[in-house]
Image (cartoon, coloured by chain):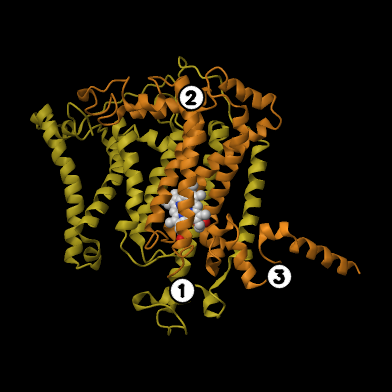
Chain colours: A yellow, B orange
Amino acid sequence: MWHNIFKIASKPDNIPIVGMLLLVFFFWFLSFWAAFKNDRIRRAAAGRPRPEGGKSKGDVVDVIDFMYPEEEQGLPKKVSCWPHLVKLEFVCAIAVMALLMFWSIPIDAPLEEPSDSTLTPNPSKAPWYFLGLQDMLVYFDPWIAGVLLPTFIIVGLMVIPYVDVNPKGNGYYTFAERPFAILVYWFGFFVLWVLEIVIGTFCRGPGWMFFWPGQEWDPHRVVAEVNINWNEFLANISGITALKTETAGLLLGIVTILAYFGLGTALPYLWLKRQEAPIIHRLGLIRYGVVGFFFWTMMALPIKIVLRLMFSIKYILVTPWFNI
Amino acid sequence: MLTEQREKIKEIITESQVYKSIFRRGFEDTTKNRVLAIFGNVFLHLHPPYVKRHALKFTHSWCMGGITFLLFLVLCFTGVFLCFYYHPDKINAYRDMKYFEYDVPFGVVLRNMHRWAAHLMVITVWLHMTRVFMTGSYKPPREFNWVVGVLLLVLTLLLSFTGYLLTDDQLGFWAVTVGTNMARATPLLGHEGPFGEQLGVTAYNDIRFALLGGSVVGGNALLRAYVWHCVAMPVTAILFLAVHFWRTRKDGGTAGPL
Ligand code: HEM
């Protein structure tokens, strides 16, 4: 079992993935450690008087004035860039160069047979950093997995600064002041992006079939997959055979998708409104809508994974031109 | 006696026209000279003259942006040497890889460094983005720099992807085939995408054709990948990097608590 895992992991082009996992875990730990530390400092500082020369105003008092002790001790807040920063950059550069040299001498970049368009490897895989996208092909048609969702990822990342109206946590680690933002980021980055890469690399074998890590990749394995569409699924559980027709499928699909985005954004909105949460006013309707759209688009991936794995559901909406 | 001579030599050097024309500042460790060291140097002046103390800590910035940039420089440097030997055509490309392995002095290490630095850069860009997110450094006034950063992220991935094809081996060929096959499915612009067929899009005029310079991953695709990889995208990346660094500085340096 370890043999197969090792065989995949030690392919030269997959070594970066192993490194990436270690680095992601390390920095995940580091950033949360720093965030919780700051949150603790802030809580402890809550009742204390503002230190002399403290800069904070209003409700952001505590963190700013207590987080960096040197500022409390009266050391200057700023230091000259030369030599303090340039020196560090230099040391850091040497360390990275050393690492790169040590990596480059013993481990050779892969070079396989000359390219041959008649010899298709099975499985054929995209470069490892795109395997998340390739794995989405299992759950979405290529125009969604390969074109639409990547575009949404890029645009979604770009709108973050414009829809995150929380003024706190600007320039320091904190969790308590922005839990929603941080949880969404880590869900997207770690669960969806990084884990999908790991699955794409280690668990997808011939025919892009799923193999548990360590399971031998048997190209002749046959999996009887009977996928059904959303309307067929509903027809089966409700016993109403009329739902199986094409028109019913079309209508049901449209209704489901509209309800998914509509209710998904409207219900939290109404709930927040009832709570009189100030965030609603700060966000405004447009920003709220953008957040809702991207959030539920992102969540569509795990939801479709669950629907597929548990109920073998393939498409929610089937039209003559495209399927979702 | 010796110190006297040394002082004298130092004076001759630092007072010479040549030295002054290059460095324009003295040796003494004064505040003024420290500032001049940054301002008077085209490479260093992207830094601010002063930085916030906490920004120096490894636990704050992880040095990730800087490491990413260093890797970019390594890639430019090794890339130039690779270009000296590489021919982007179907006959020579794979053969040149073999030359790197057996003939070119230090060819193996050169190629290895280029490849591993590229993979590493993809990882460090993600980590840099993560640290910027975790410190909330994209919040006002740095919104736009985050957007520039996202463009750099896309460029980094595309640079890596176009480079993958250049070895012209099975690995690169099929990875790029799989990748560009997705372009077939582009709505409206791809021949297998929604409404593509209705608009008269075929395999010979769709967006994939434009990317590959043909309907298959062949010699034209190799040439296009080469030009994107070695000219167009690095130049674009350098432009955005300049904006990125300039903005970091103009927005008050690495973000701190207000
Ligand atoms: C080629 C890729 C990139 C390079 C070479 C690069 C380089 C840098 C450097 C050297 C800094 C200075 C502070 C630091 O080291 O953390 C910086 C800051 C910053 N970067 Fe990047 N970056 C890249 C990509 C990105 C990406 C993908 C994002 C986000 C999506 C981003 C967003 C930012 C922001 C908002 C700042 C300001 C941070 C602050 O003020 O604390 N950058 N970048």
What amino acid does circle 3 point to? Answer: Glu
User: Residue A113 falls in which quadrant of the image?
Assistant: top right
Q: Are marks 2 and 3 on the same chain?
A: yes
Q: What x and y, as percent, mark residue A224?
A: 32, 23
- Please say if the residues under marks 2 and 3 sit with CB atoms less than 8 Å apart: no
What amino acid does circle 2 point to? Answer: Leu
Q: Chain of mark 3?
A: B
Q: Are marks 2 and 1 on the same chain?
A: no
Q: Nearer the viewer, mark 2 or mark 3?
A: 3
Q: Chain of mark 1?
A: A
What amino acid does circle 1 point to? Answer: Ile
Question: What is the number of the mark on residue B28?
Answer: 3
- Taking A284 as reference, is B111 above or below it? above
Residue on which disc 1 sits: A41
- For residue A121, say whether it is visible: no
- For residue A224, say whether it is visible: yes
Q: Nearer the viewer, mark 2 or mark 1?
A: 2
Mark 2 surroundings within 10 Å by alpha-carbon count, few (fewer than 14), some (14 through 19), many (20 or more): many
Q: What x and y, as percent, mark residue B197?
A: 23, 23
Question: What is the number of the mark on residue B96?
Answer: none
For the image, the number of numbered tags is 3
Question: What is the number of the mark on residue B222?
Answer: 2
